[in-house]
Amino acid sequence: MLLLTGSLPNDEVTTTTTKVIHGTTKVVQTEVRFFHKTKNKVDTYMNYTRPPLAITFEPIRKAFLDAKNRRVHLRYLTEITKDNLSYCKQLINIVHELRHLDGIKGNYMVSESEYIAPLILYEHGKIASQAIYSNIKQVVEQEQYVFDSLWNKAILARERIEEIEEGRVIHYETKILTNKEEIIDKIKNFLETSNELLACSGSGGLQLGYSRFLDLGKEIMARSRRAEHKGIRLLISPINRDTIELVKTILDLGVQIREIKNMPPMNFSITEKEVHATIEKMEGGEIAHSVLVSNEPAYVNHFHNIFEELWRNGIDAKTRISSIEQGTDFGDIEVISNASRVVELYLNLVKNAQKEIMIMLPTTNAFRRHSMIGAIQLAKEAAGDRKVKIRILMPKQLIQILGEEQKEPPTINSNIVHDNIDVRNIEEVMLGSHATILVVDKKLSLVIEIRDDSKTNFEEAIGLSIYSNSKAGVLSYLSLMENLWLESELYQQIKESRTRLELANKQLAVHDKMQQDFINIAAHELRTPIQPILGLSQFVRTKSKESMVIDAIDIILRNAIRLQRLTEDILDVQKIESNTLQLNKESLDLNVLISDLVADYKKQLLNGKKEGISLVTELNFSKPIFLYADRHRLVRVIDNLLNNALKFTKKGIIVATVKEEKDDQQRKLIVSVKDTGDGIDPDVLPKLFSKFVTKSYHGTGLGLYICKGIIEAHGGKIWGENNVGGKGARFSFSLPITQDSRN
């Protein structure tokens, strides 16, 4: 883009340019030339001071009329007021369409190829001395989009004129108040006319309300007791020893108060018809220097929804005050990199547990390391001496290994067995985590990253660890393990049912239904703890500046995302098996879709510094390859094939291709991903697209099964084969080209 300062030349603009025009004469000349050049349309967006100029300023009036005579379509958007009403009535006869919108502040005009914005705000009768002109396509398209969006929100001019003339107008506006006295008066009126008051504030806003508006608050609560007002609800942050007495005083008035941890970047108050907001903290209870005030329903509803969401997640103020006064404050998080300290802390937590211990051990080696440091023995002592309830989640494979070591039937090691110790096994892939999780007495949690599971020494095997007494965090981990515990119980029940049902074929359908219900329930239940873990982790990451903390949070995020993906896989499997997989089809360019995916993977290879792999496409870009399909589902299939190719290719080339074939009078597209990796194991090949078929240590074996379901739902086929006479494999799928695709 070329940005120049000066005036537009007299001849036509032939270059792509953005210019600043100086001088009222040149601004008017540019506007007139703008109207003269347009062939199809002119959209005008002007504040309430500009309609008089369009009528009384002859050069502009003539420009409008000349364009209209040439059948240029004219749309004009402005704010119609009592002061400019007569001019707007005349303007209706000059333009094709006139609409009203409250609060217009800028001025600009846009045609099919040009944009001009006079730089003037609310100076009545004055011509702008400067204007911005542009014929850059992206600028014109952007401003056209803005105009169309505002135009669609506006009302017809005749409706607005009738409102004003009949005296039934409700003036909606959003404005910024900067005068201190005006702000105070506005707040008083805001409180006095309310039927319900909702407020979200930091400690400064709380002090302001108490010191300046206490009497009004008391009056509101008196009205509330007489059922004349819905009362006051406050969200505040933080409640601590500095603010506790003030919070108590306000609670005594009958105000409902909750604390929120994630305070929005502003203080705001809402009634049923108005919202006030400021980004200032109002330190010491001082009045804010600027306050946004709006009675527009969209703003009021928006802030009301934000408040209600925050209120649902808030902590009752009385509970928070009690925890402070009893010295059981919560919210501490510590990232520990010293492995010796982790061992010490881990053993102390188990040793000092009073009621309950939950442990999740993701691998067989993790169990062995815990036995070596004495954690299992301490758990047994806690169960026997203090009657602590112990629950351990571990992989199913571990149960079998321990049984073999004892030369007994597959059962848990006798060193663990105790009346107060309960062990549940679960498929290792379903644990979905590469971290040990310990939760003690539902109050404390310790998450230990397993950096190298092949190590036998505990300290050498672990990475960063996170210790927390944060209520939300601890309960999230507890909820995760409770759901896995429930899943293991359901899994065991289904397994036992299946053994019995094998004796009677007529009950097989019942078993399938139980299995599907289990998968659906378990997957949906897993979603509940995953979302707060992701949300809280992402929030903490954005607020932290310490690289050690960021690394630790990244560990949580990675594992939570793995659980989230596993949950979605399970739900998709359930949909495929129950024939309820729904497709949202649209016309898409397969060339663009594959190119974008390959480009993303190239960036990942570059960022991961993974050398020795070349990722290429063989696509025909001479014309688009349109297909009528579900974009999201198709991306998932191609992404899975590319990801598998990268997973099994340590060095070589991966090629993505698209070609068109005709078979039995039907045209179809063949998409292939070919690699030079390890190839498909002969044992796996016959059942390649079945559930849980994998020889990889990463993944659940559901990916190709889901791909098959998606492709077949589109009416296509998918297959895999080893390359003939070379290394690697090729995965392909076909999709029919329907009439919709050709359109």
Image (spheres, grey):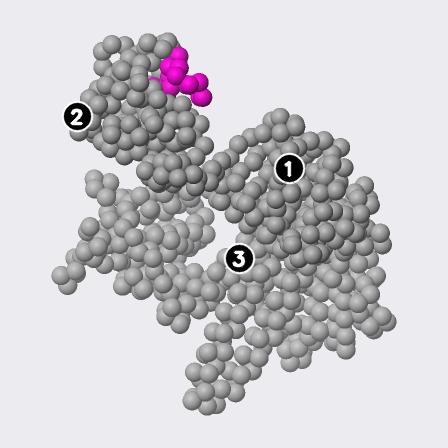
Asked if 490 appears above or below 305 in the picture, the reply is: below
Asked if 134 appears above or below 516 in the picture, the reply is: above
Q: Marks 2 and 1, Cα distance to the nearest angstrom? A: 52 Å
Mark 2 or 1: the one toward you: 1
Q: Report the side of 590 relative to 548 (left or right).
A: left
Q: Position of residue 67 (x, y in %)?
A: 21, 24
Mark identifier at residue 669: none
Q: Amino acid at mark 2?
A: Asn
Which of 374 and 523 lies nearest the eye of the viewer? Answer: 523
Q: Position of residue 71 (x, y in %)?
A: 17, 29
Which of 335 and 374 lies nearest the eye of the viewer? Answer: 335
Residue 501 on the magenta span: no
In the rendered image, which residue does mark 2 sit on?
69
Q: Quadrant of residue 355?
A: bottom right
Q: Is residue 447 at all visible to an observer of this figure?
A: no
Q: Position of residue 365 (x, y in %)?
A: 66, 61
Q: Marks 2 and 3, Cα distance to the nearest angstrom? A: 62 Å
Q: Quadrant of residue 215?
A: top right
Q: Residue at x 70, y 63 (%)?
A: 359
Most distant residue in the left direction:
665
Q: Residues within 10 Å of mark 3 (few under 14, many from 20)?
A: some
Q: Amino acid at mark 1?
A: Ile
| N-terminal label among 3 and 1 | 1
Residues in magenta? 117-136
In the rendered image, which residue does mark 3 sit on?
564
Q: Amino acid at mark 3?
A: Gln
Q: Marks 3 and 1, Cα distance to the nearest angstrom? A: 46 Å
Q: Residue at x 43, y 83 (%)?
A: 509
Label 2: element kind: helix
